[in-house]
Amino acid sequence: MKSLLLLPLLSLTALSAIVEKPVEYQQGDTTLEGYHAYDDSISAARPAILIVHQWTGLTDYAKSRSKQLAELGYNVFALDIYGKGIRPQPPEAGTEAGKYKGDRELFRARLMAGLEVLKNDPNTNPDKIAAIGYCFGGTGVLELARSGADIAGVVSFHGGLGAAEGMTADKDTLKARILVCHGADDPYVPAAEVAAFEKEMREANADWQLIAYGNAVHAFTQKMAGDDNSKGAAYHEKADQRSWQAMKQFFAEIFK
């Protein structure tokens, strides 16, 4: 009898799955290729998460995070800033990322193009959208917030915090709530940059949080960064786990 009772549950589990697929889209004359992940057992529109990749472009790392978020019930789109097939490795990655850090208007255009794909997807509840980003992508989600994008919130994981001159957050246009998960010992984001970001947030009257994780440096969520803090970028298991939990709590608040 017990085995018979389990049959409906087993059948439901077999029918539901995380769908993962590439999605081509355009920004101007540039063809981009993002990555869509969602749970096909959920029929209704749901809260949605935009992911902005690190400096090497849309790789397996961002795709794995997409699947994790889809398993939590979100509709997820990992966008592509660079263009289809452009997935540089260091040192070329630094040059490619620098193009967008040096041209924030282009950066914002690529961010908004990805956001539009997610907004227009039928699985998305357009009133419940957030964005997360890692390293270069952490800078990206803050740029999205500064642009006045109509989204509920952004989460930056070990991202750069600096704004371009004349493009800081404005209290009249800033809509997104902001969570920054920062490595307290990150040499690539010095104390002066953190202080300038905090000043910017206060002047914009933003709803913001900054959590600094002790003994963590740059790239603390990424196992491929190794474990040597002296290199400036390294994985930190506790900071990775704690920042993920902080993100989930943030989403529970902004999507309630």
Image (cartoon, rainbow, N blue to C red):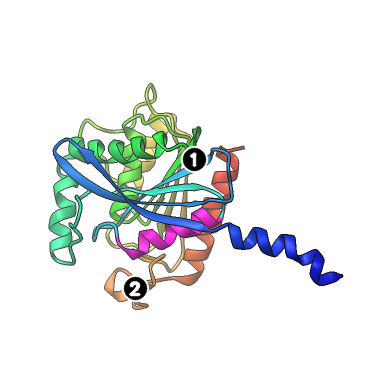
Left or right: 44 with respect to 205? Answer: right
Question: Is disc 2 surrounded by few (<14), some (14 to 19) or many (20+) residues within 10 Å?
Answer: few
Total marks shown come to: 2
Q: Position of residue 237 (x, y in %)?
A: 48, 71
Left or right: 103 in relation to 72:
left
Residue type for callout 2: Met
Decide which of 13, 115 is in the foreground and name it: 13
> For residue 224, which numbered disc appears in the image?
2
Residue 192 in view, yes or no: no
Q: Which residues are magenta?
A: 59-71
The CA distance from mark 2 to mark 1 is 32 Å
Q: Between 153 and 205, which is closer to the camera in this rendering?
A: 153
The verdict on residue 37 being magenta is no
Task: Based on the picture, tell me whether residue 70 belongs to the magenta stretch.
Answer: yes
Reply above or below: 86 against 208: below
Q: Residue at x 29, y 57 (%)?
A: 58
**Can you give x and y, in whole percent of width and height, for residue 186 in the image?**
34, 62
What residue is disc 1 on? 123
Label 1 Cα neighbours within 10 Å, binned few <14 / some 14-19 / many ≥20: many
Residue 175, above or below 14:
above
* Quarter the N terminus occupies: bottom right
